[in-house]
Image (cartoon, rainbow, N blue to C red):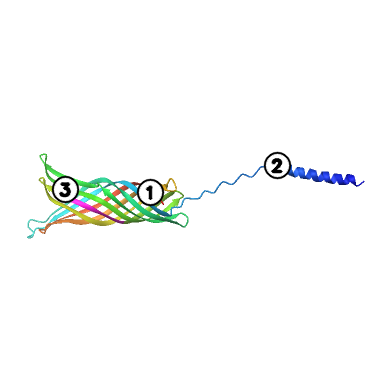
Amino acid sequence: MKIIPTSMAAMAIVLAAGSAFAADALAPEAAPMPPTEESFNWTGPYFGGFGSFAVGDMNLNSRQIFADGNPPPINGAFEISASGFLGGIQAGYDWQFANRWVIGAVADIAASSYGSSVTASVDGTEIFNGKVDLKYLGTVRARLGHAWDRTLIYGHGGLAFGKTEQTLTVGGTTVFDEEQTRTGWTIGAGLEHAITDRISFGTEYAYVDLGSKQILDNGEGLTVKDDVAFHTLKAFVNYRF
């Protein structure tokens, strides 16, 4: 008499277990979580190369003072359009902080073809030629920017230095040929994008002012000064360590 209830209980246990197994078999498996992609970090050193185009004006100012004041002083000012290319290398270090802000320092040096000239001719014969050339340009700058993962927009500014050369030819004879090392300042903005964890490309604008410098004083009242300032647009590639 007790065999039937016991058999029924055993059957109920088996059915319940089968139902649970069937439910587990029919339930969809949870999709695996995709790996979390780490955002790019700009912290670290880098080294790269660049090329840039420069355009501006070379301002020459001359003044002739006569000892007895007669005739009156002769003053002249010339604004000569200038252009050329620069190419060189750069190295720097960036530090990313407060999640997206990036601060850094960069130094560069470039050879230059930037310059200008002015010529005066009479009946097709050159009687006067003046040239002002920038031989090289270097900068040491700080930069501060905001990063959107692999894209960085920044402003920059700091010290600029270089060497200029002035040449004056009258009637085919060189009467003046001098070089000056000079310092000034630069400021601008740029954009950089990291296409891989190591390689980044960018473009950058800068205004450079190397100041005014006296290039001639003949001791007899004749002085000549030049003022060198220009704009540059740079393209660069960096390797990040």
- Residue at the spot 44% in from the left edge and 51% down from the top edge: 147
Q: Residues within 10 Å of mark 2 (few under 14, many from 20)?
A: few
Question: In this orientation, which residue lies closer to the viewer: 39 or 2?
Answer: 2
Which three-letter amino acid code belongs to the residue tagged 1?
Asn
Q: Residues within 10 Å of mark 3 (few under 14, many from 20)?
A: some
Q: Quadrant of residue 68?
A: bottom left
| Tag 2 secondary structure | helix
Q: Report the residue marked by disc 1.
A: 238
**Disc 1/disc 3 C-alpha distance (Å):** 38 Å
Q: Position of residue 6 (x, y in %)?
A: 87, 46
Instruction: State left or right for residue 17 relative to residue 227.
Output: right
Q: Which residues are magenta?
A: 159-167
Q: Position of residue 121 (x, y in %)?
A: 12, 42
> Does the magenta portion include 166?
yes
Q: Report the residue marked by disc 3.
A: 130
Question: In this orientation, which residue lies closer to the viewer: 238 or 84?
Answer: 238
Q: Report the residue marked by disc 2.
A: 25
Mark 2 or mark 3, which is nearer the start of the sequence? 2
Instruction: State left or right for residue 183 relative to residue 168.
Output: right
Q: Position of residue 208 (x, y in %)?
A: 29, 52
Mark 2 or mark 1, which is nearer the start of the sequence? 2
Instruction: State left or right for residue 228 relative to residue 148.
Output: left
Which three-letter amino acid code belongs to the residue tagged 2?
Ala
- Residue at the spot 35% in from the left edge and 53% down from the top edge: 91
Instruction: State left or right for residue 158 relative to residue 12.
Output: left
Which three-letter amino acid code belongs to the residue tagged 3?
Gly
